[in-house]
Amino acid sequence: MYDVYTSVNKRNLMGSVLKAFALSLCMAVIGMLIGTMVPPALFMPLIVVEFIMILSAFLLRKKKSVGYGFLFAFTFISGITTYPIVAHYLATSGAKVVLSAFTATLVIFAVMSFVGTKTKKDLSFLSGFLLTALLALVVIGLINIFSPFSSTALFVASIIGTVVFSLYIMFDFNRMKRMEFTEEAVPLLALNLFLDFINLFLELLRFIGFLSRD
């Protein structure tokens, strides 16, 4: 009887995470729409705020729960800061590329979430590899700001990024299935899924944008 209750409770909690994740995507879309009206000079300060927020969530996650207000504020700002990237590809590569990247993101997210949830294997062994790969991508991104890489190098980086964030989706769903968590953890888990989704979308956008060049 207890096992049945635990199973039902876990499904309810995972359902809450997915609902919060869906609302996060809606907030990001609203942010992107607002981004069309934001002066270019404000994008960099917003990116800094976004970085500070995600760093704070990471550093304080064991001491204090991330709330829904934080989740939706972050995803809203993330939508605003994502707008210039999407607008760039709309202008240079066309709506077809953006739509293709978004569709591919949805498909990969669905497949990897299914695999992560259904597999009987504990994927926690991927944690160290994924974190190292993520930090490497962050370093590459920072270096590229000050000393731009060649288009070929960035293309390779987009492939690596696509693989890393695809694996992160599988990893996060597998971890959710195996870990015990309460309602308080829902916003943070939804934030993890949002970061997986939006970063996968951006990597696929770069990848497909490169392939679409004449």
Image (cartoon, helix red, strand yellow):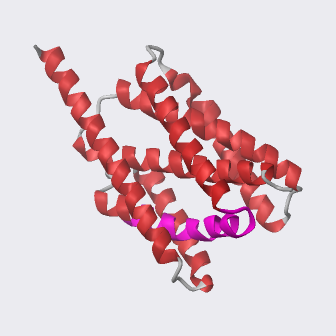
Please identify the quarter of the rendering in which residue 70 is found: bottom left
The residue shown at (66%, 47%) is 204
Q: Is residue 66 left or right of residue 114?
A: left
- Which residue range is magenta in the image? 73-94
Residue furthest to the left in view is 1
The residue shown at (64%, 66%) is 85
The residue shown at (36%, 26%) is 177
Q: Across the whole image, how many numbered discs are drawn on residues? A: 0
Q: Magenta stretch: residue 118 in it? A: no
**Residue 33 in picture, x, y percent from top left:** 47, 73
Compared to residue 194, the image places residue 107 above or below, namely above
**Residue 102 in picture, x, y percent from top left:** 56, 50
Q: Where, quadrant-wise, is the C terminus in this rendering? A: bottom right
Residue closest to the eye, 64 or 27: 27
**Residue 48 in picture, x, y percent from top left:** 57, 71
Residue closest to the eye, 13 or 31: 31
Q: Where, quadrant-wise, is the N terminus in this rendering? A: top left
Please identify the quarter of the rendering in which residue 193 is found: top left
Q: Is residue 21 left or right of residue 5?
A: right
Can residue 164 be seen at all in this image of the molecule?
yes
Can residue 63 be seen at all in this image of the molecule?
no
The residue shown at (45%, 69%) is 31
Q: Is residue 19 left or right of residue 59?
A: left
**Residue 176 in picture, x, y percent from top left:** 38, 31
Which secondary structure is most common in the magenta stretch?
Answer: helix
Compared to residue 73, the image places residue 125 above or below, namely above
